[in-house]
Amino acid sequence: MGIVQSRKRYVIKLERNGETVQIVVIAKNLESMYKEVYRLYGNFLIDEKGNDTGTISFEEIALSPTVQQELHIQASNSCQK
């Protein structure tokens, strides 16, 4: 099993000119979260001249890593005569 990187859930509120959008992004760090927000909602946050027109507020929630474990049961033939 490899190392499990912790990820975080970001509950994000985007606002512009009285308009509000709420989204959820799962990312490994704050930088990744911002990249994803601008990739998906950059047109909402930036006007046609390239100026920032919106605001971003967020809540960060740590996700606990899920680890799957395999259970190997060896069948024994203890009933042999």
Image (cartoon, rainbow, N blue to C red):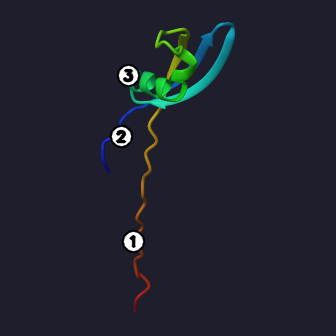
Quadrant of the snapshot with the C terminus: bottom left
Q: Position of residue 7 (x, y in %)?
A: 43, 31
Identify the secondary structure beneath mark 2. loop
Amino acid tagged 1:
Gln
**Residue 68, relative to residue 46: is it above or below?**
below
Depth check, mark 1 against mark 3: the one in front is 3
Q: Position of residue 71 (x, y in %)?
A: 43, 60
**Residue occupying the point 40% across, 77% down:** 76
Q: CA distance from mark 1 to mark 3?
A: 47 Å
**Residue 61, relative to residue 2: is it above or below?**
above
In the picture of the structure, the residue carrying the numbered disc 2 is 4
Depth check, mark 3 against mark 2: the one in front is 3
Q: Is residue 81 left or right of residue 46?
A: left
Q: What mark, if any, has residue 31 been given in the picture?
A: 3
Identify the secondary structure beneath mark 1. loop
Tag 2 or tag 3, which sits nearer the N-term?
Answer: 2
Pick the residue in front: 78 or 26. 26
Q: Is residue 12 left or right of residue 18?
A: left
**Residue occupying the point 54% across, 16% down:** 45
In the picture of the structure, the residue carrying the numbered disc 1 is 74
